[in-house]
Amino acid sequence: MMPTRNTTWIATIALVSVLGCRNARPLPVDPLPVAQAPDPTTDHAVQLAHMGADAVLWQHASAEYHRIAQQGYELARLRLAENLRVTDARPSAVIVDIDETVLDNSPYQLEAVAQGKPFDQATWLEWTTKASAKATPGALEFLKYADEQGCIIFYITNRDVRERAATLKNLQDLGFPDADVDHLLLMEGTSDKTERRARVASDHRIVLLVGDQLRDFDERFKDRTVDHGRPLVDTMTDTLSRYFVLLPNPMYGTYRDAVQGKGTDAEKLARMKAWFEQGH
Ligand SMILES: [Mg+2]
């Protein structure tokens, strides 16, 4: 078929367009990233930090965490009321831990994952110095209730003396009762809280403890060599049930320390990977 006048023009325009495109200056294109050899030290840290991502996401962004923390403090209120029915001449004391018990540090942990940097004392200190942590859901309401019931609140924490002023400011700004120097027992040399609990018990009746680690109740829970410490929980359920309320903390703690151990990031990462590979 002979081309018509119209089809000839269309073909001509198409040819000019193609030639025109060939002669046009190419659009700028971002260069492909050049692969660089990973820095082993940084890479270990990044991998280790990213292993905590789901835990941080859950605590920082789930209504489930929010509700479970509230539930914990609802239980604390019930247990406190039960325990206060028993009269005692000594003043009643409630002992609470601070981190992930009355203060939520998930913003710090979130930053650690985003930056690919595992926990570090220097960055932790920067965070606590801001005194900007929010209260754990339910904590403030519970401790105000305990205060109204005549209990004295003691904060036993493994924050250290450098963090004293900012920690008190954070607690006071949020309105926590008994947030003063006399009721804040910081870490002095050991993370074992046994002696500090005994100091409170020397002239108070401890009616309830609240923490995010079983060690906030009894140092024996540091030992995770037998079935991750679960048998000891089972032998102590009566006491735990009556005197201790445990809050969730998926982000860090004895459970993770028991697997990753101490040492360099590379060593911790190797132990974590080995644990997963063993298919526990
Ligand atoms: Mg804690």
Image: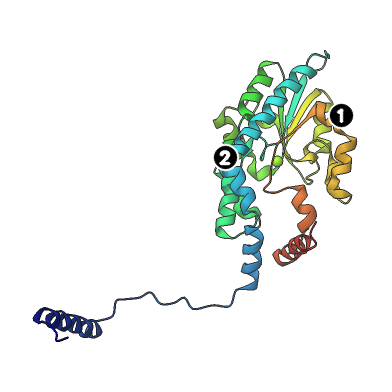
Q: CA distance from mark 2 to mark 1?
A: 33 Å
The answer to which quarter of the image holds residue 266 is bottom right
Left or right of 176, for residue 257? right
The answer to which quarter of the image holds residue 272 is bottom right
Q: Give the x, y percent position of residue 203.
A: 82, 23
Q: Earlier in the sequence, mark 2 or mark 1?
A: 2
Left or right of 196, for residue 7? left
Residue bearing the label numbered 1: 238
| On-image quarter of the N terminus | bottom left
Viewer-proximal residue, 11 or 174?
11
The residue type indicated by label 2 comes to: Ala
Q: Residue at the front extreme?
A: 1
Viewer-proximal residue, 132 or 234?
234
Query: Quick one: SS at disc 1?
Result: helix
Mark 1, ligand 1, within 8 Å: the answer is no
115 above or below 247? below
Q: Give the x, y percent position of residue 160.
A: 69, 44
For ligand 1, the image quadrant comes to top right
Question: Which callout, 2 or 1, points to the residue nearer the camera?
Answer: 1
The residue type indicated by label 1 comes to: Asp
Residue bearing the label numbered 2: 133
Q: Residue at x 74, y 17 (%)?
A: 81
Q: Give the x, y percent position of residue 233.
A: 85, 39
253 above or below 201? below
Viewer-proximal residue, 185 or 279?
279
Viewer-proximal residue, 59 or 141?
59
Q: Give the x, y percent position of residue 215.
A: 80, 40
Q: Residue at x 57, y 50 (%)?
A: 110
